[in-house]
Image: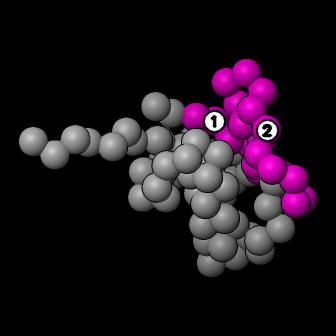
Amino acid sequence: MHIRIKVKVGGKPPELHGDEMIVYTVAKMERGQANIDIIKQVSKYYHIEQTSVRIVSGFSSRKKLLEIREKQDPQ
């Protein structure tokens, strides 16, 4: 599943608006700190592990595309 993210400054929880999620962060936009915080918030929102969320595009942008991978069942 892919989800579009718009990043804003603030301390509110994530908000889902149609097919876009607004994620608020107070983490610094340097050395990937904000991206790490965004992944933490999205994984918490969907109740999944952080390793299931990755940024596909927009690493240095306020608009990002995230991929949420579903957990694979061991066979």
Work out whether 38 lies above or below 29: above
- Number of numbered discs: 2
Q: Is residue 57 visible?
A: no
Query: Badge 2, how many Cα within 10 Å: few under 14, some, many 20+?
Result: some
Outermost bottom residue:
31
Secondary structure type for disc 2: strand
Position of residue 17 measured from the top left corner of the image (x, y, whole percent): 78, 27
User: Label 2 sits on what residue type?
Assistant: Glu
* Disc number for residue 4: 1
**Residue 61 versus residue 43: which sits nearer the camera?**
43
Q: Nearer the viewer, mark 1 or mark 2?
A: 2
Per the image, is 35 magenta?
A: no
Outermost left residue:
75
**Residue 72 versus residue 6: which sits nearer the camera?**
72
Q: State how far apart marks 1 and 2 are (Cα).
A: 12 Å
Name the residue beneath numbered marker 2. Answer: 15
Q: Is residue 7 visible?
A: yes
Q: Which residues are magenta?
A: 3-23
User: Label 1 sits on what residue type?
Assistant: Arg
Give the colour scheme shown: one colour
Q: Residue at x 59, y 57 (%)?
A: 39
Residues at badges 1 and 2 in contact (C-beta under 8 Å)? no
